[in-house]
Image (tube, rainbow, N blue to C red):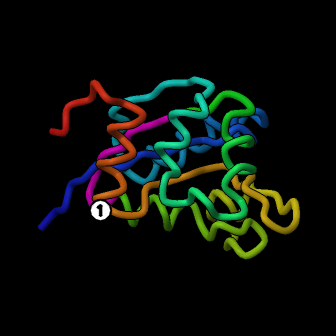
Amino acid sequence: MTTSERSLVLVKPDGFKRGLTGEVLRRIEAKGYRLVALEIRTPTRDLLARHYAEHEGKPFYETLLGFMSSGPVTAIVIEGDQCIAGFRSLAGATDPTKALPGTIRGDLGRDWGMGSTENVVHGSDSPESAAREMAIWFPDLSAG
């Protein structure tokens, strides 16, 4: 039985600036996921406030919005069997120092110290988050 689903993946400003979008896309496609949508843009603070709404009021919120709006981001919708959990495994632990070798963050992430948000990629963490995030980044994309 297959569980095809869609997820939002972001190559964050640090990954884009370092020219890692192609490598992230290569790994996504090598894993067998299909690219449904892709756009490069510098997100507005309004878009990011909606994306990170659950973190509003937390100590890192303003730093996160500042970082994520600091330059271009590659926004991607992927599709495939269990791609939400699969991409999060492919991405590795949030902290690049703790991410295992072979993962995107383990191989490509940099540890910039306490509270760093510069970990190359974001991936939706649940079907509900994926649906909410895709609606924010790709409002014209059909759910099916």
Which residues make up the magenta segment? Answer: 75-83
The kind of secondary structure element at disc 1 is loop
Position of the C terminus by quadrant: top left
Instruction: Check the image and report above or below for 29 versus 122.
Output: above
Front residue of 102 and 88:
88
**Snapshot quadrant of residue 117:** bottom right
Task: Determine whether, in the image, residue 110 is placed left or right of residue 34.
Answer: right
Front residue of 124 and 27:
124
The residue carrying pointer 1 sits among few (fewer than 14), some (14 to 19) or many (20 or more) residues within 10 Å by Cα, namely: some
Which x, y percent locates residue 97? 78, 71
Which x, y percent locates residue 3? 19, 61
Residue 82 in the magenta stretch? The answer is yes
Instruction: Check the image and report above or below for 121 versus 14.
Output: below
Residue at image x 84%, y 63%? 111
Residue 74 in the magenta stretch? The answer is no
Which x, y percent locates residue 27? 53, 49
Residue at image x 45%, y 58%? 87
Q: Amino acid at mark 1?
A: Gln
Task: Determine whether, in the image, residue 76 is placed left or right of residue 142.
Answer: right
Front residue of 135 and 92:
135
Task: Determine whether, in the image, residue 70 is placed left or right of residue 125.
Answer: right
Which x, y percent locates residue 53? 49, 52
Position of the N terminus by quadrant: bottom left
- The residue carrying mark 1 is 82
Residue, far left: 1
Residue at image x 38%, y 39%? 77
Chief secondary structure of the magenta span?
strand
Residue at image x 71%, y 69%? 95
